Image: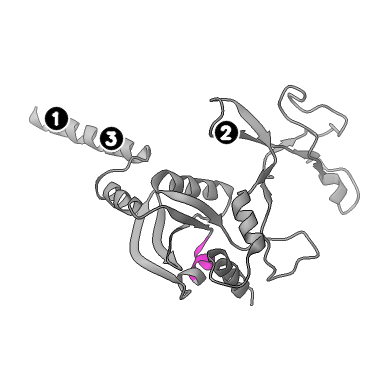
Amino acid sequence: MFRNIFSTFIYVLIFVISQEQANGALHGSTKKMVDEANKKGPYLGLVIPNMFEMNPLLNNPHYKSTKLVIDYAGRRFRFGNIYNKPVILVMSGMGMVNAAVATQLLLSLFEIKGVIHYGIAGNANPNLNIGDVTIAQYWSHSALWNWQRYGDGPEDPLPFEGEGGFTREIGYLKFGSYSSNGDDNMLNNVWYQAEEVYLVDGTPEQTQQAFWIPVDSNYLSLSKALEMGYYIIIIIINIIIHQHQ
């Protein structure tokens, strides 16, 4: 009897711990470290896709590590200073989903006054070359598509079109246009779609559609006015240039 009670207790305890971890709850030493770190904030958050792009910053003499590292939910948050400005570095992993998760964890856990994401990227503009630095005014998430069934064309309506659903305003990609023999392609067409955005101060469960998302206007103005000097963003730009030399 006691063995059964003990086994049941252990099972329930393990289940509760697993639920707490699954829900992302802070507990124990991790919570204490986060609370102590936030007393020294607010921080500038640097979200970086991989170690290839992070290592130049870690090795840059202008970055001074405080030796504080907090591991949580598969991410490692590194604390330091750049020209006496407190920063937190986090490696997000590749892709939009990883970037979004890492950024949300950064904002949820720590006192953050701004977020900068930097890294290398592909380019479809023939006027840009390897090593050029670009600072975006807008960004888009171009992975939300409406994929038309084979046989439908630009004149055929999209699902829920005209009802706040899919739209044909952004443009589409016709796979048949890129067939080597000029024939049609059963992949047909994909129409790019806007994201559904939940506003922080908006009505719950009501969204707005947006394809082009503006970056922070203050950071954009700052980046336009930057000259070679003691600025955090210039350090990051120099690092990116160094990667391509």
Residue named by callout 2: 199
Secondary structure at numbered mark 2: loop
For the point 49% across and 69% down, which residue is it?
57
Secondary structure at numbered mark 1: helix
For the point 42% across and 66% down, which residue is it?
84
Rate crowding at label 1 as few (under 14), some (14 to 19) or many (20 or more) other CA atoms within 10 Å.
few
Dominant SS in magenta: helix
For the point 67% across and 33% down, which residue is it?
209
Camera-nearest residue between 219 and 235: 219
**Can residue 165 be spotted in the picture?**
yes
Residue 102 in percent (x, y) is at: 48, 49
Rate crowding at label 3 as few (under 14), some (14 to 19) or many (20 or more) other CA atoms within 10 Å.
few
Secondary structure at numbered mark 3: helix
**Between disc 1 and disc 2, whose residue precedes?**
1
Residue named by callout 1: 4
Mark 1 or mark 2: which is in front?
2
Residue named by callout 3: 15
Count of numbered marks: 3
Q: Amino acid at mark 3?
A: Phe
Q: Give the magenta part as a residue range.
A: 50-55
Tell me if residue 97 is in the magenta stretch.
no
Q: Amino acid at mark 2?
A: Leu
Q: Is residue 101 above or below residue 239?
A: above
**Can residue 121 be spotted in the picture?**
no
